[in-house]
Image (tube, rainbow, N blue to C red):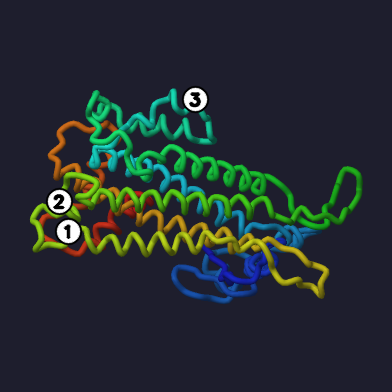
């Protein structure tokens, strides 16, 4: 439980030299570290934990410094969070299908076979499972032949996000199991070779793609959310309030959703396309991987809140319709929401409800 203090800025993604140097200093009894809430000099932090500074052997210094652990480690955590959010987003979409009384024909496996886009069939199958037992599968249950695209395109868009997630997982696993230090010491042949295995362009591009895919999924979530609140698209009360014009219902949450989606779109813009040359022009290329990973994590945080908001609004829509029979997965999602968030009758601040559901998605509550 000795945690080195590491600056968030200082690496451009051509090996995370500066952040890892701060970590290495603490191993040597230098630098600064946190131990039990107190900031101490490295040697004192180690002593407080009953540890001694390490003695480095041959090549240990390069092994500690010349890799991309400050990108890969946080990246692995971001991907775990992203997977949880995408699972919750599929559940939110299923709950919105129920609340909107959407047409489930776009989930038909025969349609997926007509154009097997990456991830589409898998997500359609997942939504079908979440809606297992729903009355929406009965003939004539849908209110429209053609629903808004926020409902019709869930399999395509969430499926693409799932594929991007898998691509980022593969890129992280390569880094976790590979050697990126330069020079490489080939012990068996007795050679030392200069190389560029520290370059993690593939990792940066995988996270850029994931961020952009999540931004598309966020846009669809907002569109479903707004349609749930609009009598022009459904037969529910405006802004999902059971009381009427004297109450706001979910009206102000539209601003929250719009703000979150705008921030997600901004964060999805590439940051990996250019960085100023360093090392007197010798290091004239870098992919800015640590920042790419960090901003993808910020996208996930905002998408978690947006997903929580959709779950709450969709649960409200289901309760307003007094639906006794919904799909198995949708029923479980509804129960999760109601375990921390009551039905909205009289207006109340909804921020705490959104944060409570978001914490359930994150697994922190």
> Regarding mark 1 in the picture, which secondary structure is present there?
loop
What percent of the width, then of the height, locates residue 148? 34, 43
Q: CA distance from mark 3 to mark 1?
A: 41 Å
For the point 58% across and 47% down, the residue is 168
As drawn, the label of residue 237 is 2
> Regarding mark 3 in the picture, which secondary structure is present there?
helix
Mark 1 residue crowding within 10 angstroms, few (<14) / some (14–19) / many (20+): many
As drawn, the label of residue 191 is none
Which badge, 3 or 1, is on the more N-terminal residue?
3
Q: CA distance from mark 3 to mark 2?
A: 38 Å
What percent of the width, then of the height, locates residue 177? 67, 45
Q: Position of 257 compared to 264: left or right?
A: left
As drawn, the label of residue 249 is 1
Nearest the eye: 346 or 247: 247
Which marked residue is nearer to the observer: mark 3 or mark 1?
3
Which badge, 2 or 1, is on the more N-terminal residue?
2
Q: Is residue 257 visible?
A: yes
State the residue position of label 3.
Answer: 113
Which badge, 3 or 2, is on the more N-terminal residue?
3
Q: Position of 193 compared to 287: left or right?
A: right
Disc 3 and disc 1 in contact, CB within 8 angstroms:
no
Q: Residue 235's image quarter?
A: top left
Mark 2 residue crowding within 10 angstroms, few (<14) / some (14–19) / many (20+): some
What percent of the width, then of the height, locates residue 316? 19, 48
Which marked residue is nearer to the observer: mark 2 or mark 1?
2
Disc 2 and disc 1 in contact, CB within 8 angstroms:
yes
Nearest the eye: 121 or 140: 140
Mark 3 residue crowding within 10 angstroms, few (<14) / some (14–19) / many (20+): few
Nearest the eye: 186 or 83: 83
Q: Is residue 28 visible?
A: no
């Amino acid at each position: 439980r000795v945690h080195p203090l590491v600056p968030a800025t200082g690496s451009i993604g051509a090996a995370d030299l500066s952040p890892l140097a701060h970590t290495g200093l603490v191993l040597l009894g230098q630098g600064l570290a946190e131990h039990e809430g107190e900031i101490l000099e490295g040697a004192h932090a180690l002593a407080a934990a009953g540890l001694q500074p390490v003695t480095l052997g041959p090549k240990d210094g390069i092994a500690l410094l010349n890799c991309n652990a400050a990108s890969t480690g946080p990246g692995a955590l971001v991907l775990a969070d992203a997977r949880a959010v995408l699972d919750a987003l599929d559940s939110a979409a299923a709950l919105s299908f129920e609340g909107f009384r959407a047409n489930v024909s776009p989930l038909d496996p025969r349609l997926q076979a007509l154009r097997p886009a990456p991830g589409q069939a898998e997500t359609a199958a997942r939504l079908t499972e979440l809606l297992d037992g729903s009355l929406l599968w009965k003939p004539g249950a849908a209110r429209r032949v053609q629903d808004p695209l926020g409902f019709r395109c869930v399999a395509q868009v969430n499926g693409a996000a799932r594929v991007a997630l898998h691509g980022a997982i593969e890129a992280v696993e390569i880094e976790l199991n590979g050697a990126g230090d330069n020079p490489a010491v080939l012990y068996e042949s007795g050679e030392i070779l200069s190389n560029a295995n520290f370059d993690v362009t593939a990792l940066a591009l995988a996270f850029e793609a994931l961020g952009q895919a999540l931004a598309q999924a966020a846009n669809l979530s907002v569109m479903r959310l707004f349609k749930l609140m609009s009598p022009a698209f459904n037969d529910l009360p405006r802004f999902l309030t059971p009381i009427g014009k004297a109450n706001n219902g979910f009206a102000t949450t539209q601003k929250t959703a719009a703000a979150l989606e705008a921030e997600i779109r901004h964060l999805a813009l590439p940051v990996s396309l250019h960085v100023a040359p360093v090392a007197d022009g010798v290091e004239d290329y870098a992919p800015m991987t640590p920042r790419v990973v960090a901003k993808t994590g910020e996208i996930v945080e905002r998408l978690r809140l947006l997903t929580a908001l959709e779950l709450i609004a969709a649960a409200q829509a289901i309760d307003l319709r007094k639906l006794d029979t919904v799909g198995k997965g949708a029923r479980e999602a509804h129960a999760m929401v109601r375990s921390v968030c009551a039905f909205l009758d009289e207006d109340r601040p909804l921020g705490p409800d959104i944060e409570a559901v978001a914490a359930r998605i994150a697994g922190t509550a």
